[in-house]
Amino acid sequence: MKPRLQKHFEERVTPRLMEELGLDNRFRVPRIEKIVVNVGMGEGARNPKVLDKVVDELGGITGQKAVVTRARKSISNFGLRENMPVGAKVTLRRNRMYEFLDRLVNVAIPRIRDFRGLPTRAFDGRGNYTIGVREQLIFPEIDYDQVESVHGMDIVLVTSTDKDDEALALLREMGLPFRGGTPVVVSGEEVAGPAEE
């Protein structure tokens, strides 16, 4: 069965973006190709138990086993040696990607304290968008009593376009609550309300 957000993309977002961007071929419509969730843990090299816990938490949040990332080269100022474990990451595609994005937009982001909308300046110039999360506790999969250390994470949405304005139009239609946005409705339910400036 197709995820709810994938159906929304195919049935509603694609025709809207074709009209808005003036495209005549539906295969030229920008789409989300993958989502990369990354956690950097500098203390992972000194305390492997912390890193194991982060890998477990990422697996619970995304529904996919995390990969431990390692240092590419030695940096003596940071006490780093080449190949030391420094974090964990998960790359999501297809159904898991849509399901994670659905949970992020509808469950996790509304749980952020004093949330005023996502900034529109976090694009990298090639159509990819990065969301920085300060604590993993916004995800309901995390059991508060089991958390040993609070850490942040980067969530990178990689799109098929290389233009930031097309990627912004895509992500806004997919329900991401940008500052000054209007609510987006997916199958009769409001996905993201307008954020206050």
Image (tube, grey):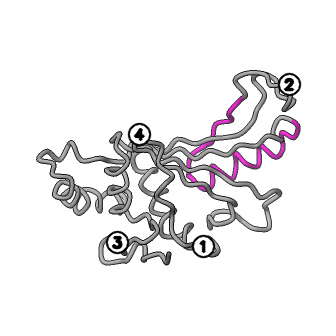
The three-letter code of the residue at mark 4 reads Arg
Q: Within 10 Å of the Cα at label 4, are there few (<14), some (14-19), or many (20+) other Cα atoms?
A: some
Q: Is residue 32 above or below residue 9?
A: above
In the image, the segment drawn in magenta is: 46-70
Mark 4 and mark 3: Cα distance apart in space: 25 Å
Report the disc number at residue 76: 2
In the rendered image, which residue does mark 3 sit on? Answer: 184
| Picture layout, residue 148 above or below residue 111 | above
Q: Which mark is residue 111?
A: 1
Residue 151 highlighted magenta (yes or no)? no
Which secondary structure lies at badge 1?
A: helix
Amino acid on which disc 3 is placed: Val
Q: Residue at x 29, y 60 (%)?
A: 7
Question: Which of the 4 quarters of the picture holds residue 20?
Answer: bottom left
Closer to viewer: mark 3 or mark 2: 2
The three-letter code of the residue at mark 1 reads Arg
Compared across the picture, whether 61 is left or right of 5 comes to: right
53 or 155: nearer the viewer: 155
- Sequence order check: which comes first, mark 3 or mark 2? 2
